[in-house]
Amino acid sequence: MFAIVELLLLPLFLLLVIPLCIATFAFWIWMLIHAIQNKGLSEGEKIAWVIVLVFVHFLGALLYFFIGRPKATLPPLAST
């Protein structure tokens, strides 16, 4: 009985779960690189976002996508 279930779940795993994991990892890397290069953030904000991304992974990437990334369209901050 278990062998039949395993045979049915293996293709589902290979076709859905593995590509989803690869896509989420690529999204996380994209957000990490974007946070480092975002000219709309101060140095302190960049460091904070990188720490959030490193320790909270995909949830941090989603937060950065919706909160931190839009600041890239703002003019660069003047350093004091």
Image (cartoon, rainbow, N blue to C red):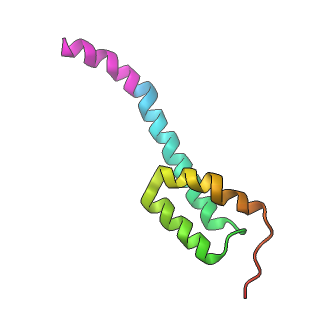
Rendering coords of residue 62 (x, y %): 56, 50
- Report the label total: 0
Q: Does 71 lie within the magenta span?
A: no
Give the percent coordinates (x, y) of residue 4: 25, 12
Q: In the image, is residue 18 above or below residue 73?
A: above
Residue at 62% x, 52% y: name it. 65
Q: In which image quadrant can residue 76 be found?
A: bottom right
The answer to whether residue 10 is above or below residue 70 is above
Look at the image and say whether residue 7 sits in the magenta stretch: yes
Q: Position of residue 8 (x, y in %)?
A: 33, 15
Q: Could you tell me which residue is drawn at 40 percent across and 27 percent down?
A: 14
Q: In this view, does 36 lie above or below 16?
A: below
Q: Is 4 placed above or below 65 here? A: above
Q: Is residue 70 left or right of residue 22?
A: right
Q: Nearer the viewer, residue 71 or 34?
A: 71
Q: Give the quarter of the figure containing the C terminus.
A: bottom right
Identify the image quadrant of the N terminus.
top left
Residue at figure coordinates x 49%, y 47% from the top left: 25
Q: In this view, does 30 lie to the left or right of 55?
A: right
Tell me the quarter of the picture where residue 74 sits: bottom right
Magenta stretch, residue numbers: 1-13
Tell which residue pokes out farthest to the right in this image.
75
